[in-house]
Amino acid sequence: EIVLTQSPDFQSVTPKEKVTITCRASQNIGRSLHWYQQKPDQSPKLLIKYASQPFSGVPSRFSGSGSGTDFTLTINSLEAEDAAMYYCHQSSNSWTFGQGTKVEIK
Amino acid sequence: EVHLVESGGGLVQPGGSLRLSCAGSGFTVSTNYMTWVRQAPGRGLEWVSIIYIDGNTYYADSVRGRFIISRDHSQNTVFLQMNSLRPEDTAVYYCARGDYNAYFDYWGQGTLVTVSS
């Protein structure tokens, strides 16, 4: 099973600050890495597909990068509405998720 | 507009069975990859099962042999039959549409399954 490890587990950030979340895969997954946002009491929403392609309607402040085993989700100029859990997800071999990163607004 | 609505959750005793449904609208379930993902209380996301366009099905090790995914074209619905339920199966179960059996682009609101005596 491919294990995805996100860091950090928790981040407290002030509005307009830049947020960086990393996701490391236990083996090479190419670019088969996707990012989701889940707000409290809501279902997950797709943000980024295939490491760097934004999903339709996602604000431009969200971007992704990486390939192989190391990936990054960046939120430029954080807004209050971005407070949420963020999960990475791989589809290279079966499907697994990272443990999640909680982003809190200071 | 793509929309998914799950139903069928509830309280069931250990060893019992439950059938979840996920009704799709705005697209055709049988011409898309459809998946179930669960989330235990206060925990992260866990992939459960997927049904391919060609009908092939796949399961997480934790549910293989106990859960069965299926679909009905006439109802535009995907199902998850859950047998021999265990307390560790307690979770919100989400259905989602898969694109190229890779990422999951649209999700339902989830249905809560509680396994307890």
Image: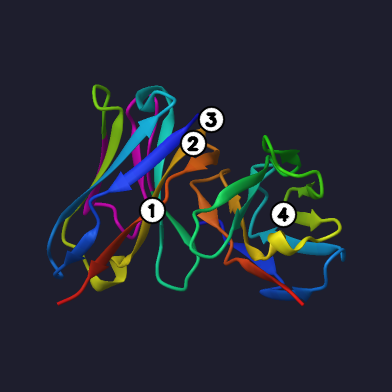
| Mark 4–mark 2 distance (CA, rounded to whole Å) | 23 Å
Q: Amino acid at mark 1?
A: Gly
Mark found first going from the N terminus, 3 or 1: 3
Q: Which residue in the structure is indicated by mark 3? A: B100
Chain designation of label 1? B
Q: Residues within 10 Å of mark 1 (few under 14, many from 20)?
A: many
Q: Which residue in the structure is indicated by mark 4? A: A69
Is the residue under label 2 in contact with that under label 3 (CB below 8 Å)? Answer: yes
| Mark 1–mark 4 distance (CA, rounded to whole Å) | 31 Å
Residue visible at 48% across and 46% down in the picture? A94
Span of residues in magenta: B49-70
Q: Are marks 3 and 1 on the same chain?
A: yes
Is the residue under label 1 in contact with that under label 2 (CB below 8 Å)? Answer: no
Chain designation of label 4? A
| Mark 3–mark 4 distance (CA, rounded to whole Å) | 21 Å
| Mark 2–mark 1 distance (CA, rounded to whole Å) | 16 Å
| Mark 3–mark 1 distance (CA, rounded to whole Å) | 22 Å
The foreground one among B15 and B65 is B15
Q: Amino acid at mark 2?
A: Gly
Q: Is residue A84 above or below residue B98?
A: below
Q: Are marks 1 and 4 on the same chain?
A: no
Is the residue under label 1 in contact with that under label 3 (CB below 8 Å)? Answer: no
Chain designation of label 3? B
Quarter-of-image position of residue A82: bottom right
Tell us which disc is closer to us: 4 or 2: 2
| Mark 3–mark 2 distance (CA, rounded to whole Å) | 6 Å
Q: Which mark is residue B110?
A: 1
Q: Is residue B45 magenta?
A: no
Q: Which residue in the structure is indicated by mark 2? A: B98
Left/right placement of residue A88 relative to residue B32 reads right
Q: Are marks 3 and 4 on the same chain?
A: no
